[in-house]
Amino acid sequence: MGEFDWKHILFAFDGRINRGKFWLGAAVIWVAITLSFFIAVAVNSPIGWFLFVLAYTVVFWAGLSISIKRWHDRDKSGWWILIGFVPVIGIWALIETGFLEGTKGDNTYGPDPLAGG
């Protein structure tokens, strides 16, 4: 996998990514959904809103992808993503994926993304 293999970062569920790539992916997702919303509002037609829903679907998939890979970096199953749906306790998902360091060295889900190789 290349340094910035966007296809893998945003659409694959295997492997690991570090916090930097997680936040970069989150920023790309935020910009994409915001732009598609403003375009849909400006066009204000059924096709505009259909394209917004289509963009949102792609962005939702990308969000799942980066979150699951961050859980993998913490050496936890991607199913931990479901903790985000638990009120109050769900904030732990943001802490785990966005702020805590990943497992040093190889883990169950692949090599250390910060190992440089």
Image (spheres, rainbow, N blue to C red):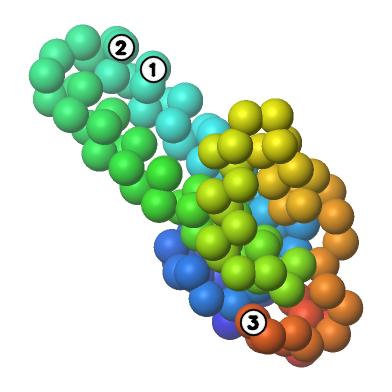
Q: Which secondary structure, mark 2?
A: helix
Q: Residue at x 78, y 87 (%)?
A: 106
> What is the quadrant of the C terminus in the image?
bottom right
Label 3 Cα neighbours within 10 Å, binned few <14 / some 14-19 / many ≥20: some
Question: Residue 69 lies in what quarter of the image?
Answer: bottom right
Name which of mark 1 and mark 3 comes first in the sequence. 1
Circle on res. 38: 1
- Distance between the alpha carbons at the discs numbered 1 and 3: 38 Å
Question: Where does the image place residue 108, in percent across and percent down from the top left?
Answer: 68, 85
Residue type highlighted by circle 1: Phe
Residue 32 vertical position relative to residue 21 in the rendered view, above or below: above
Q: Is residue 114 left or right of residue 13?
A: right
Label 2 Cα neighbours within 10 Å, binned few <14 / some 14-19 / many ≥20: few
Q: Residue at x 20, y 23 (%)?
A: 48
Q: Extreme left residue here?
A: 46
Query: Which residue does the numbered mark 2 point to in the structure image?
Result: 41
Q: Residue at x 41, y 44 (%)?
A: 60
Residue 17 vertical position relative to residue 23 in the rendered view, above or below: below
Question: Residue 104 lies in what quarter of the image?
Answer: bottom right
Residue type highlighted by circle 3: Tyr
Question: Where does the image place residue 41, in percent across and percent down from the top left?
Answer: 30, 12
